[in-house]
Amino acid sequence: MIEIKDLHKSYQMGSNSLHVLKGIDFNVQKGELVSIMGSSGSGKSTLLNIIGILDEADQGTYTLDNTLIKNLNEKVAAEYRNKFLGFIFQSFNLINYKNAIDNVSLPLYYQGVARKERSEKALHYLEKVGLADWATHLPNELSGGQKQRVAIARALASDPKVLLADEPTGALDTKTSYEVMELIQNINDEGKTILIVTHEPDIAQMTKRIVDLKDGLIINDTYIEPVIANAHV
Ligand code: ADP
Ligand code: MG
């Protein structure tokens, strides 16, 4: 699903250059649940943003679902993001003046799906994350965990090939974090490929594979028997 070879990324700041990714080789098969671990500043978000076609590498190759991701203009990049990827962020990134169902519908609107089908699909995914009763509520009427569930429903709505989550539990308490991880595990059990960036070891233990980043390189890549989040809830 994801093939990355010898990826490099530097940031230019004036006359200084910060070499953040220093030769990343990384493959993900369909159906994996992978965590990318590493301390703050190790390059996790940079890598996830490149995988998410939000940023581009300076060197190396990236192939997503057999499509080479290279030199895309913003229009094509947006199309590919819409077609291939669903995003989950630490701060949820919901639109405050839109209710839950309209937030979930939004990616479908951009795909040109008709209004009725949009609403039906959005409600289906809200049901899937256990929030059907909250469909008409605004984000500020929801708890942090509920907001993240809406964001997960939104990420699922376009049935992406890959879900990308950058610190999805970073703004949640431990119990709520484990509930969100239980949902993520259930979505993965249905076959969805999921990548999670986290710096929390207990969250990484709930995935099936832990990739450790340090100073811009992968220093460890281990398949594990995941801790079942449900056992902690
Ligand atoms: P992580 O997500 O692991 O905390 P990041 O990928 O966000 O790390 O950042 C890696 C390094 O790159 C950090 O030193 C950060 O300050 C720097 N960095 C990230 N984004 C930019 C940017 N847009 N411009 C300049 N430096 C950046
Ligand atoms: Mg980060």
Image: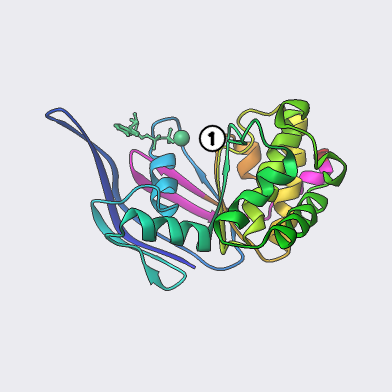
Q: Position of residue 2 (x, y in %)?
A: 45, 64
Decide which of 151, 18 is in the foreground and name it. Answer: 151
Q: Nearer the viewer, residue 202 or 18?
A: 18
Query: In this view of the protein, can residue 206 be seen by the observer?
Result: no
Label 1 SS: loop
Front position in the image: 143 or 30:
143
State the count of labels: 1
Q: Is residue 122 visible?
A: yes
How far across and how far down the image is residue 227, in percent? 72, 48
Farthest residue, direction bottom: 66
Q: Residue furthest left?
A: 15
Q: Residue at x 85, y 46 (%)?
A: 132
Instruction: Pick the quarter of the image with the C terminus.
Output: top right
Q: Which residue is mark 1?
A: 199
Q: Residue type at mark 1?
A: His
Colour basis: rainbow
- Cβ of mark 1 under 8 A from ligand 1: yes
Quadrant of residue 141 within the rendered picture: top right
The residue shown at (31%, 59%) is: 72
Q: Which residues are magenta?
A: 211-231
Q: Is residue 232 left or right of residue 44?
A: right
State left or right for residue 100 relative to residue 56. right
Residue 220 part of the magenta segment:
yes
Does 151 sit above or below residue 76?
above
Residue 118 lies, in percent from the top left, at 70, 58
Can residue 32 be found in the magenta stretch? Answer: no
